[in-house]
Amino acid sequence: HPRINGEPYVLLDRSVEEIIHFMAKDIPNPIKTSWPVQKIEYGPGGAVVWGPGGERIRCTHCLVTAPVSVLGAGDIQFVPPLPTRKRMAMKRVQMCNAMKVIMAFSEPFWPDEFFDVICTDSFVPEFWVTKYPPTEGASEELRSLH
């Protein structure tokens, strides 16, 4: 397995959605996707999750995976309201636009322990250097780019 800073790094060969559905195969009620949640009423006995058209789901546990921007904007109503500390954190955390650029080099020209660079006032404010094991045919593809 590839490693980054000594930690294992997983490269997926399928979408994360496929993995979620595989992990949930034994759950009696299907996972809802593309189902905008409007309200979550929660307490010691479980939760009621409200979605489109007033549809609701009763559950013993609820995992919220909404974007920080949705949570910070208050697009999901929590009953009772989440603790002040959590609401303030959701308003402070911001997500920005990002772009992924992948470049391949025939030989690394950076030190082995090199991982990332942060240049907050530049056009590219942060970049990572990651070494992946070569894939079959990669050398020929790289040579053809010259």
Image (cartoon, rainbow, N blue to C red):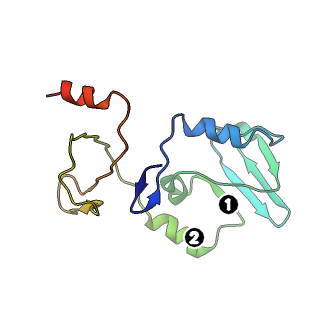
Above or below for 128 versus 134? below
Callout in the foreground (1, 2): 2
Numbered circle sitting on residue 62: none
Which of 134 and 44 lies nearest the eye of the viewer? 134
For residue 4, which quarter of the picture? bottom left
Horizontal side of residue 6 vs 145, given as left or right: right
Q: Which residue is drawn at 82% across and 49% down?
A: 58
Horizontal side of residue 123 vs 56, given as left or right: left
Q: Distance of mark 1 from mark 2, alpha carbons?
A: 12 Å
Instruction: Locate residue 28, reporting x and y percent.
Output: 84, 40
Instruction: Locate residue 124, reporting x and y percent.
Output: 21, 52
Horizontal side of residue 76 vs 113, given as left or right: right
Query: What amino acid is at disc 1?
Result: Phe
Task: Give the residue number, with chain letter if any, for mark 2.
Answer: 86
Horizontal side of residue 138 vs 71, given as left or right: left
Task: Give the residue number, with chain letter if any, for mark 1.
Answer: 78
Instruction: Locate residue 50, reporting x and y percent.
Output: 73, 47
Above or below for 98 versus 44? above
Q: Could one spot residue 34 in this view of the protein?
A: no
Query: What amino acid is at disc 2?
Result: Lys
Whichever of labels 1 and 2 marks the residue nearer the N terminus, that label is 1
* Residue occupying the far bottom of the picture: 85
Q: Residue at x 43, y 50 (%)?
A: 2
* Residue occupying the far left of the picture: 146
Instruction: Locate residue 49, reporting x and y percent.
Output: 74, 50
Q: How crowded is mark 2: few (under 14 residues within 10 Å), some or many (20 or more)?
A: few
